[in-house]
Amino acid sequence: MDFLKDVAKGVQPDIGKNVVVIGAGNVAIDAARTAQRFGAEVTVVYRRVKSDMPANKDEIKEAEIEGVNFLFLSNPTEILADVNDRVRGIELARMACGDIDLSNRRKPVPTGESFIVGCDTVIMAVGEEVEAPFLKEFGIKCHSNGNIFADHFTFKTNFPKIYAIGDAVTGPSTAAEAMGIAKKAAEVIDFELTNKRRFHKLFRAFDYSNEVPLKPEGGNRHYSVKRPLEERTGNFKEINLGYTKEQAYEEVARCLRCDVRVTVNNEEE
C-alpha cells in the first residue's frame, strides 16, 4: 500500500478533505485511521455487512470512535474524475445479501441501484499478494496467487536450501502465527545442519496439573487505558497506553488457565 508506505517515510500525503477507502481488512482500517489523522473526512466502503469484515474488531471499534464513516453493502463500479483528471467522486452499486457462499458468508448481490459519493481521493485496500520479485529470478515455485510453494512439514521450497514461512506461504495471517511456524522451521533447519535433535534444549520443561481449580484466582479482565479522542487527531501517538500500576498488579493475580472458562459477574473469562 503506497499510501501507508509514504506516511511511514514521513511524506505528507495530498489526499484532500474527503477520502474513500475500499476494503474491510486491517490494512483498510489502518489507511482510514491514518487519513483521518491528516484531517480528512473518511468513509470505508465494503460490499458486505459489518459482521463480515475481516478486520480486527477492536480496530473497527476504535475507527468508529475516531469518526471514520462506514458504507456497507456498497460495491465500487467507477471512479469519477473532473476535467483536470483529478478524482471528484466514486460511483457505488447498492448490494443486498444473497445466499451463503463458500466463505460461509451471505454473498453480496447487486440490486440494480447505484449512487455517487463525492471525494478527493480513493484508496484501494482490497486483496493481498506476495511482493517479492526475486522469487522469479531464483526460479522459486509459487502458487497462482503468488504465495510460495513450500512443504508443510519441512518448509522447503523447490530449492532444498531455501525455506519459506509466514505470509509468503500462508497468505495474510498474524505475526504470532508466523513466529510459531518460524520456530518449527528453525528446528528443521537445525537438524538438517547438525543431524542432531537438540532444539528442545532451548526451552525449559514444566509440568502443570489438569485439575480445574474450584475458585480461580483474580477477578474480571482489565482493559488498558486508551488515549483520549481529542489527543489523537493530527498525530500518531500510541493509542493503547497500557495498564495502570494497580491494574497490572491485579491482572497478574488472575488465573491464567486458559483451558478453564467460567462466568464472573456475567462476563465469560
Image (cartoon, rainbow, N blue to C red):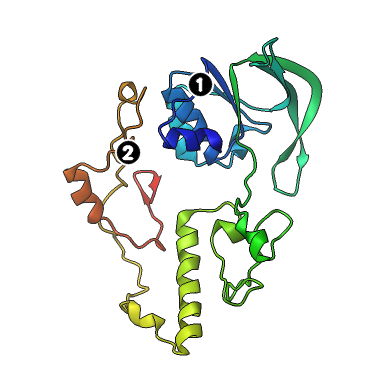
- Tell me the residue at 49%/78% (across/down): 189
Q: Is 4 situated above or below 219?
A: above
- Tell me the residue at 30%/41% (across/down): 224
Q: Position of residue 205 (x, y in %)?
A: 32, 79
Q: Position of residue 199 (x, y in %)?
A: 40, 81
Q: Is 232 situated above or below 192?
A: above
Q: Earlier in the sequence, mark 1 or mark 2?
A: 1
| Quadrant position of residue 162 | bottom right
Outermost residue toward the front?
137
Outermost residue toward the top?
83
Task: Please name the amino acid that badge 1 sits on.
Answer: Asp
- Side of 206 where 114 appears, left or right: right
Q: Position of residue 93 (x, y in %)?
A: 75, 23
Mark 1 residue element: loop
Outermost residue toward the right?
112
- Viewer-side residue, 221 vs 68: 68
- Tell me the residue at 65%/58% (across/down): 147
Q: Is residue 30 visible?
A: no
Mark 1 Cα shell of 10 Å, populated few (<14), some (14-19), many (≥20): few
| Quadrant position of residue 231 | top left
Indicate which disc residue 14 carries: 1
| Quadrant position of residue 76 | top right
Labels 1, 2: front one? 1
Q: Where's the N terminus, which quadrant?
A: top right
- Tell me the residue at 40%/85% (across/down): 198
Q: CA distance from mark 1 to mark 2?
A: 28 Å
Mark 2 residue element: loop
- Side of 8 where 123 appears, left or right: right
- How many circles with numbers are drawn on the protein? 2
Residue for badge 2: 240
Q: Is 191 situated above or below 75?
A: below
Task: Please name the amino acid that badge 2 sits on.
Answer: Asn
